[in-house]
Amino acid sequence: MKNVAVIFAGGVGKRMNLGDIPKQFLEVGGMPIIVYTINVFQQLDIIDGIIVVCIEQWIKKTEDLVREYGLNKVKDIVSGGKTGHESRLIGLRCAKKYYEEAVVLIHDGVRPLIDHKTISEAIECTNKNGSAVVCSPAIETIYRECGDSRTIIPREQCFLLRAPQCFILSEILDLYERETAKGNNDVIDSVTLMQMYNRSVPKVIGPPENIKITTPLDFYMFEGIMKCRNNNG
């Protein structure tokens, strides 16, 4: 079975306070974050193709970057929708045009610190179980507040839901189509969608640094990690 990554670069970076520059196009060490992310999948032999879902006004810029950095596994760059749900549906439909059946890895364009080992394990888990989601163990105790109820949850019981989220392409696309047909265009993510249809999604433990760059703090953490990696060769 083929393996295709669908990478989402549709955020506008409101929490980064960047003005007109989407966070995925910020540069670290002279290279945009989105290129770091795509390149992880580009360099992994078991990845057959990549679909990028992008802000419409930045498609041309993304096409230029794909050419500049030789990212030849990118099959298509398409414009996203109004919500994350709509963008994922668009990306999955595009993947289906190129691959009749595949393991699809749904990943964030601003999550560049995923590694080859974790991606490979997620694909293996999906081939065995039908799906997988990359998580990281919580490193602090969780305080949960719901109405008047307050609960302390030991960190050993908690995991941070991250990405990639991996599925059989035909199955997850079918669920998105079904939910969209009902008029629901805003399911928060694909694991939530699977749970809505009583499908289980096994976890694969990934690296703690597999953060999503959402705030300035995240950006500085990524910048610091890359400086350390470069200095250590």
Image (cartoon, rainbow, N blue to C red):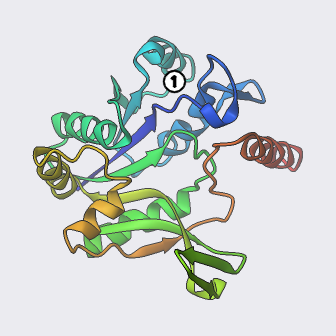
166 or 80: nearer the eye?
80
> Badge 1: few (under 14), some or many (20 or more) residues near its Cα, within 10 Å?
few
Furthest toward the front, the residue is 148
Looking at the image, residue 144 lies above or below residue 77: below
Three-letter amino acid code at the position of disc 1: Gly
Q: Residue at x 65, y 78 (%)?
A: 142
Badge count: 1
Looking at the image, residue 55 lies above or below residue 53: above
Report the residue marked by disc 1.
Answer: 70
x, y percentage for residue 221?
78, 48
44 or 189: nearer the eye?
189
164 or 179: nearer the eye?
179
Quadrant of res 110: top right
Quadrant containing the N terminus is: bottom left
Q: Residue at x 67, y 65 (%)?
A: 208
x, y percentage for residue 104?
31, 51
Furthest toward the right, the residue is 231
Q: Is residue 199 left or right of residue 154?
A: left
Q: Residue at x 80, y 42 (%)?
A: 220
Q: Is residue 95 left or right of residue 41?
A: left
x, y percentage for residue 49?
34, 39
x, y percentage for residue 3?
31, 51
- Numbered disc 1: secondary structure: loop
